Image: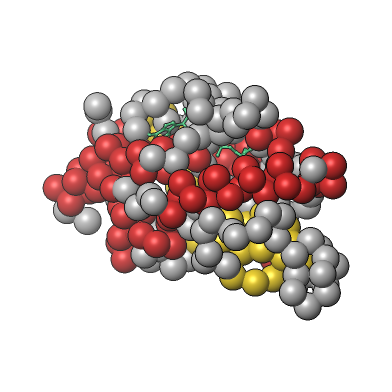
Amino acid sequence: MDLSPLLPLLHRTARVAALTGAGISAESGIPTFRGPEGYWKNHRPEELATPQAFQRDPRLVWEWYDMRRTRIAACAPNAGHATLARWEGRFADFAVITQNVDGLHQRAGSRRVIPIHGHIWEMRCTREETTILDYTTPLPNLPPHCPACGALYRPAVVWFGEALPMEALAECGRILDTCDVLLVIGTSGQVHPASTFPYTVLERGGAVIEINPTETPLSADATVSLRGPAAVVLPAIERELHREPS
Ligand code: OAD
């Protein structure tokens, strides 16, 4: 893979950000949403990750999250997550905006992570809005209820049709308005508003580097589009940067 077009973009660059999706966790063993294992019991994610599905059948939705939690608990961050964690030390300003709820960036050591779709390891009382961290997996009784008021708990994630947390959106705005380079890693670019983030950067003259084994709607517009798995391409970029004088 020819990484030479990247070097002028990343050398002496202070402000770099990454936008990640399910693909960065694929090599940790977590299936992507729109890949071959994206369906669960014949349901697509768009049919389960909605307030309507939860209202209709909270047990079914919780079973899906519980299956995912169990699977994620058995997985570890991969070389892609680890490379991004190290880049906090390489670039003066480095942040990860992630659509993933798996917590693998944080486990790999990234400290500046904006998880725009929430956390699979947290749940929230649907009445009192109190959020609790929950590391128990699998949960003993599904669906779980708030011990204080008896209302249902829901996963503390953002569902289709729900607004992103204001604070996270504001932080993303600040990053996208100032970064020199945005790396777009392992996302199909089909879910709003993350799908618009690369265009915010491109429109004000910033560079966008896409890393994905398959073509996406962004590929034609990206400054550089690299075909390959994140756990291979990110360490390869890092090696290339080390070889060049910084
Ligand atoms: P998708 O499943 O839509 O897309 C995953 C992308 O990762 C695809 O473009 C794959 O080609 C790519 N990919 C696969 N293996 C890879 C690898 N080893 N390295 C790099 N890329 C790889 O996942 P997202 O784009 O993250 O939202 O999906 C966005 C949102 O839709 C999710 O956050 C979730 C989902 O439904 C909610 O639940 C609200």
What percent of the width, then of the height, locates residue 144?
70, 61
- Of all residues, the one furthest to the left in this rendering is 243
Tell me which residue sits at (51%, 42%) in the image.
21
What percent of the width, then of the height, locates residue 181?
45, 47
- Of all residues, the one furthest to the bottom in this rendering is 148
User: Can residue 186 be seen?
Assistant: no
Asked whether 195 or 71 is in front, the reply is 71
Asked whether 102 or 6 is in front, the reply is 102
Looking at the picture, does residue 226 appear above or below residue 49? above
Q: Is residue 213 left or right of residue 99?
A: left
Q: Is residue 152 left or right of residue 198?
A: right
Looking at the picture, does residue 11 appear above or below residue 210? below
User: Can residue 198 be seen?
Assistant: yes
Tell me which residue sits at (38%, 50%) in the image.
75
Tell me which residue sits at (27%, 37%) in the image.
232
The image's colour scheme reads secondary structure
Looking at the picture, does residue 96 appear above or below residue 24? below
Q: Looking at the figure, which quarter contains the C terminus?
A: bottom left
Q: Quadrant of residue 114?
A: bottom right
- Count the labels in the image: 0
Tell me which residue sits at (44%, 68%) in the image.
111
What percent of the width, then of the height, locates residue 44?
66, 29
What percent of the width, then of the height, locates residue 23?
45, 37
Q: Looking at the figure, which quarter contains the N terminus?
A: top left
